[in-house]
Amino acid sequence: MAITIDRLCHQLIENHLQFENTVLIGLQPRGIYLSGRMHQALMKLLPGAHIDYGKLDITFYRDDFNQSKTLHVPSETSIDFSIENKKVVLIDDVLYTGRTIRSALDAMLDFGRPASVELLTLIDRRFSRQLPIQPDYTGRTIDALISQKVRVLWQERDGKDEVILID
Amino acid sequence: MSLSVKHLLGIRDLQRQDIELIFQTADQFKEVLQRPIKKVPTLRDTTIVNLFFENSTRTRISFELAEKRLGADTINFSASGSSVSKGETLIDTVNNILSMKVDMVVMRHSASGAPHFLSKHIDVPILNAGDGINEHPTQALLDSFSIREKLGTVEGKKIAICGDVMHSRVALSNIYCLKKLGAEVTVVGPPTLIPKYMAAALGVNVTYNMREALEWCDVANVLRIQLERQNTPLFSSLREYSLAYGVNKALLDSLHKEIIVMHPGPINRGVELSSDAADSKQSIILQQVENGVAVRMAALYLLAGERKRSLVE
């Protein structure tokens, strides 16, 4: 996983150079581990660069508030910088139906009007999209059955780095 | 995670984890209220009626704002100028409003137990915005939320509830809420304004000495003298009450530590609380009002979620 994250960082640097006008936003609750790692790695790769990094919770923007059997408890949102006219890189661990990203776009737009938005995900589950949303940067593409769950485990939270398939 | 109740009728019915869930949710709504666009679309398919059978400024505006910030549609009803004066019963009034496809009811009534009665007859979530001298749950939640924000926690803190405890729904809800969160509570006021069996029934300390209570506490929640609910004179004059139980800056300065002063509003300035105390740095009265919106958003969000869940199942 470390190698993949490293590669994603270099891909970001290719497009955003010194990150003067680019900000990173990780999605709660599980995307923030990836975004946190990437933020740290980028700071090491670009000593002296200042990279704005925030966390976004999308609970209040979900489209399944009507249907969901469990109530989602919100997590922290902290975006203490302006995203107006910035290039935003949204970061999440798994891209599946695309609905989370749709909600995230809505939530993010309440903070201002960015110049552009890109999407980075560690895992892209192909052939399962329900909305026209595709990642700009992908760690690994996988095919999984609809009935299966893909979960990314993180050292900080789960004690080890691992991607698992749950039946 | 979800609430253990379908309605928010009183703090008495809540579990400690319900209160903590509301606070945890309110933290995030408080952040929403700092954003450039202070609004989320969560309840955009929900219509909420605010039924106010009794006067209100803060609570009604706060609820309406909370509903609008959640994207809900709102309708406001106040008893004066409605068909209530023509003799329509409470159930008829509410059922007529609900037949227009309303999803939630926020209600204030001068009769204690009015929302409990209504909850047995209608199907939608009810939020009690104050019923007679019984409970005012969202006020207690925002009070404890404000204490938690200021002191980090409510657990183990010493709270004095001062003044007209007898007629105060704020006092009763606050006592339930603070006790459930593990705080110590003392009620203080003239003997005529403190119910006799309070200590035994609710597990609070009782004192009739204001200075003693203030020396003891971390936070003083000063209640309004509710003259409109007092049919017989319970103290000789407002002047005398103010001299014995009024909180002013000189009294606060003479204490051995700096305590926090709260008031649920509206303040009778110069009676239970002087202007120099109400406007001092120790007062968090306006923060209470600010937190009210976030706490009410949390309560509305969680109850709406409960209802949606029950409809799905």
Image (tube, coloured by chain):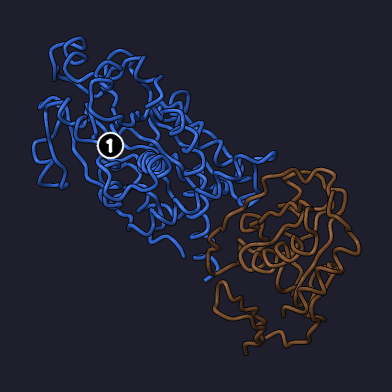
Figure chain in brown? A
Residue A61 location in percent, x, y?
66, 55
Residue B95 visible in this rendered orientation of the protein: yes
Where residue B142 sits: x, y (%)?
Answer: 41, 40
Q: Position of residue A29 (x, y in %)?
A: 61, 65
Residue B81 or residue B291, whichever sits in front: B291
Q: Residue at x 45, y 26 (%)?
A: B57
Residue B91 in view here: no
Q: From what the image shows, is residue B192 above or below residue A62?
A: above
Task: Looking at this view, name the residue that lies furthest to the bottom.
Answer: A167
Decide: few, some or many residues near mark 1? Use Cα within 10 Å; few <14, some 14-19, many ≥20.
some
Q: Give above or below for B24 relative to A37.
A: above
Question: SS for tag 1?
Answer: loop
Q: Quadrant of the N terminus of chain A?
A: bottom right
Q: Residue furthest right?
A: A15
Give the residue type at disc 1: Asp
Q: Which residue is at a point 81% across and 43% down the rendered structure image?
A: A84
Q: Which chain is blue?
A: B
Quarter of the image for the C terminus of chain A: give it.
bottom right
The part of the image, by quadrant, that contains residue B225 is: top left
Judged left or right of residue B13, residue A46 is: right
| In the image: residue A40, left or right of residue A12 | left
* Residue drawn at x 12%, y 26% as measured from the top left: B209
- The number of callouts visible is 1
The residue indicated by pointer 1 is B218
| Residue B180 vertical position relative to residue B62 in the rendered view, above or below | below
Residue B98 in percent (x, y) is at 51, 47
Subunit that carries the residue with mark 1: B
Residue closer to the observer: B264 or A43: A43
